[in-house]
Image: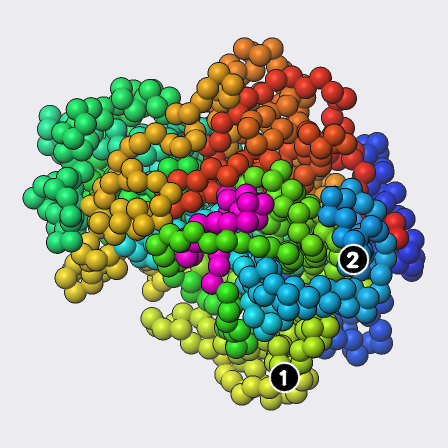
Amino acid sequence: MTGLLDKVRASSEVSRRSFVKASAVASAALATGAMAGCSNKVGMADTGVVTGDENTSETDYGRNLTEGAWVSAACWHNCGGRCMNKVLVRDGVVIRQKSDDTHEDSADYPQQRGCVRGRSQRMQVFGADRLKYPMKRKNWSPEEPHGELRGKDEWERISWDEAFKYVGDQLKRAYDTYGPRSILAHSGSYVSYNAMRPLLALGGYVGITDTTSMGTYNLDTTKLGLPSKDGGAASSNDRYDMLNAETIVLQGCNPAWASAGSTCLSFLNAKAAGVSFVVIAPSYNATAQLLNARWIPLRAGTDTAFMIAVAYEMVKLDEERGDVVDWDFLNTYCVGFDAEHMPADATTNENFKDYILGAYDGTPKTAEWASEICGTPVEDIRWYAEAIGKQHKVMLLHSYSFARCHDSEDVPQMFMTLGAMGGHFGKSGHACGTAYYAQAGNGGPSLVAAGMANVPPIDNGVDDLVAGPILWKSVLEKKYPFVGNICAVTQPREERDLDIHVIFWEHSARLQTTPDLVRGIEAHRAVDFVFCNAQFLTTQAKYSDIVLPVTTEWERPGRFGQLSNRETLLIYSQVIEPLFEAKTDQEIGRGIAEACGLDPDEVYPLSEKQQFMNEILGATVAEGGEMVPLVTVTADDLASWECEGEPQEGKVPLAEFMERGSYQVERSAGDEHSFIAYADFVADPVANPLPSNSGKFEIYCQWKKDTLDSLGFSSNFKPYPSYHPAVEGWETRSDEYPYVVYNPHYYRRSHSVYDNVTWLREAWPNPVFISAQDAADKGIQTGDDVVVYNAYGKIVRTASVLQTLMPGMVGLPHGAWVDFDESEEYDLGGADNVLCGPTVSGMAVSGYNNYNCNFEKYTGEPLVPDCEQPQRIIEL
Ligand SMILES: Nc1nc2c(c(=O)[nH]1)N[C@H]1C(S)=C(S)[C@@H](COP(=O)(O)OP(=O)(O)OC[C@H]3O[C@@H](n4cnc5c(=O)[nH]c(N)nc54)[C@H](O)[C@@H]3O)O[C@H]1N2
Ligand SMILES: Nc1nc2c(c(=O)[nH]1)N[C@H]1C(S)=C(S)[C@@H](COP(=O)(O)OP(=O)(O)OC[C@H]3O[C@@H](n4cnc5c(=O)[nH]c(N)nc54)[C@H](O)[C@@H]3O)O[C@H]1N2
Ligand SMILES: [Mo]
């Protein structure tokens, strides 16, 4: 090992320029399958960017990086892991990368280990395809924008001065001529330093309202009685309590892929303790395999019908046996299950029980009834109805894929209703809540948290927000229905005009991650000016006029990894100086501000380092039932950081925290941090009411129906959970489009991020998943290229034929970079949103998981495997 390290170190003298060549060579080696690992490691060391004299660099925080030091490095993407990454930096060169070895691994005190994505982070940061300089599209000029060439044109290098001048002039022209409603912009950055601030200071911009992650759980589920808007981490129990369950149900979850890092550990511990698992999903996914779960198959987008039938079968079984439905729980803690327990604000006499028995439509919602819709075998529905009855210790846990479907607005209420029928709230060994993202299987409030950056917000002077699925259609049609923020406070529908002239994207991949991508490209080509910040030639950079190279988190003053599990707070530092001419988002924002005639110091009153220091000073940790200061910061620390603030006493000295890279609360069974969701409410529902109007779980929620009606996208929702065919989905399949496509979040990527990393491309080839039966019908085998198409677009991918996927379902992984062929008809990259359209109903949910489609063998040129494709390297 030392030998290799020495060799790598020796090669660190190579210049930056030859690094680019070396890295390109490395990827060519990958392409031919030759010694990829070794070549890339050399490429890595060659990235040397010398940081300057010993201990004088911005990046060193007092460490001696000339000798070599392990530095806590960011793993900052949006996959929910945000795990520990450390890099060995010597002479400004990253030599090696590792994960958490700050302490011995144990169940009480697990290491926060990274996954393959985090461990490939250096391939991203130092990728030969990093954007190095500001760029302009050759045929774009303020006078003749040639929007039709977006995505096809060549690039030319420009200086930052030119870039800021172009951007400033275009922004000023749009604000002066058309006003702030002519700008469409979005930043996914949740921190205070994003480059939206100058736009806000100039009057604001039209934004986007999109249900993305939590789907229909965004329709304020506190009105149903859930603890926070999205169900949230406080809706399920602490990880230790999972060991007390008999059965854990995971509905619409795949933490093995989508809550990576250490989060599956909690489930594995439960499995080792003898807990059995049930997975309800269209495929026997990686998590089901990991946990040896019983699989209840169902078609994507049909969970409401499935759960309604389970409720019916529970009632029927209870009539026979008397020990299935927890009537005490329903009568004490819920409203609307039956006619005797209606909420005060109900405007109809209907209730859930009579609905499922068929009193209103003559159709009892039996297992046979649901099986037709969901494809779930009748015996599975009956088995499940018994298995989640009140005599069993069951945890019903969900992620949100089943709520990212058209007409899934009743999923949150129906999931809660099953929990209430089994009485699975507020007791050890029982739960009904979320298992999502970093908190999967470890519910409860955060035990350690970062503080706020304390940058005063600038209000957006424009209230326009366009719903995700109809964003591009609205830009093209120059009108849209305004309904407020569908993820926060909705407003009754109002038809508005829309006249977009400028588009700006930062720290989100909106063109790539918003439905109706083909129209998205059209919309990009229709406006006067498009610009973005980007690290690579991502989809939206490709369709822009000016691209501003932005740093990665390894090239900034450091920050917190905000989204770790409840026990851990990660902190990371700057690793290297900005590569080439890349600037941070705040530096770019300052440049834009200045070019627009604003004072950058007013727009950005705090330096990035001061913002970081404020977050450090405000960091807290749980102790004795309250949150106390976490970090000891001395007057010397403040002076050496050149930051303002009051010195303070905490649990860990700043330097030690930074060096370690994390603060993790060591747990033990029965400790003060144990958490049972809803325990207070169940102990005393009068003293501790839920946030709903009635203070109880609302199985009948008048607010839900009235709000959905006011949005004007559909009118068939009832105040209680009910079934109606989806506006698009299994119910609307036709001879033309007989299948349903859904989008699993994929291990190779975090959304669109990392899709360009050749190591990950080699390990995870990004096929399209097709069921064995459907493949046999069409004569398709694993390895064949197929075109998947529908009314919205066409993608080509190589088939992976699965026995473990339900017939009728097509699984297209989320987030692949768009790569249209020359005809612009076939997307060879396999981007999910090419097959998602502008379909809306209910709350205008982005219903990624139930679009109709068809597929055939592809007769064009065979696809080149992704890992053999050339990187998008721009020669300027
Ligand atoms: N590697 C990786 N991890 C990620 C992300 C990523 O892009 N990559 N993204 C992160 C983010 S922001 C999010 S929102 C989460 C998403 O996390 P999840 O919602 O858990 O992710 P999905 O892969 O969409 O869905 C999980 C599983 O649900 C099943 N499923 C799909 N549709 C349905 C349905 O209609 N009903 C039922 N019952 N099951 C269904 C499929 O088996 C699928 O594999 O993942 C986070 N983690
Ligand atoms: N069809 C379909 N669409 C989906 C989904 C689906 O399941 N199916 N899932 C949805 C979900 S749950 C989510 S959360 C969204 C995610 O949608 P997005 O947030 O749009 O997706 P990301 O790919 O994470 O975009 C992050 C972008 O920021 C860039 N970036 C990274 N670091 C920095 C930085 O420091 N500064 C700047 N300026 N840029 C940076 C990355 O290169 C990347 O382009 O996608 C949604 N879209
Ligand atoms: Mo998400």
Q: Position of residue 763 (x, y in %)?
A: 68, 35
Tell me the crowding category of disc 2: few under 14, some 14 to 19, or many 20 or more residues within 10 angstroms, Cα based: few
Is residue 90 found inside the magenta-colored segment of the image?
A: no
Instruction: Please say if 168 is above or below 436.
Output: below
Tell me the crowding category of disc 1: few under 14, some 14 to 19, or many 20 or more residues within 10 angstroms, Cα based: some
The residue that appears at 54% across and 59% down in the rendered structure is: 206
- Front residue of 271/632: it is 632
* Residue carrying label 1: 643
The residue that appears at 12% across and 47% down in the rendered structure is: 342
The local secondary structure at tag 1 comes to: loop
Instruction: Please say if 741 is above or below 398.
Output: above
Is residue 470 found inside the magenta-colored segment of the image?
A: yes
The residue that appears at 21% across and 58% down in the rendered structure is: 693
One can see residue 852 in this view: yes
Magenta residues (range): 463-487
**Position of residue 29 in the picture relative to residue 314 (left or right):** right
The local secondary structure at tag 2 comes to: loop
Number of numbered callouts drawn: 2
Label located before the other in sequence (1 or 2): 2
* Residue carrying label 2: 143
**Position of residue 241 in the picture relative to residue 532 (left or right):** left
The residue that appears at 25% across and 28% down in the rendered structure is: 309
Q: Quadrant of residue 507?
A: bottom right
Instruction: Please say if 788 is above or below 679.
Output: above
Q: CA distance from mark 1 to mark 2?
A: 45 Å
Q: Position of residue 470 (x, y in %)?
A: 50, 44
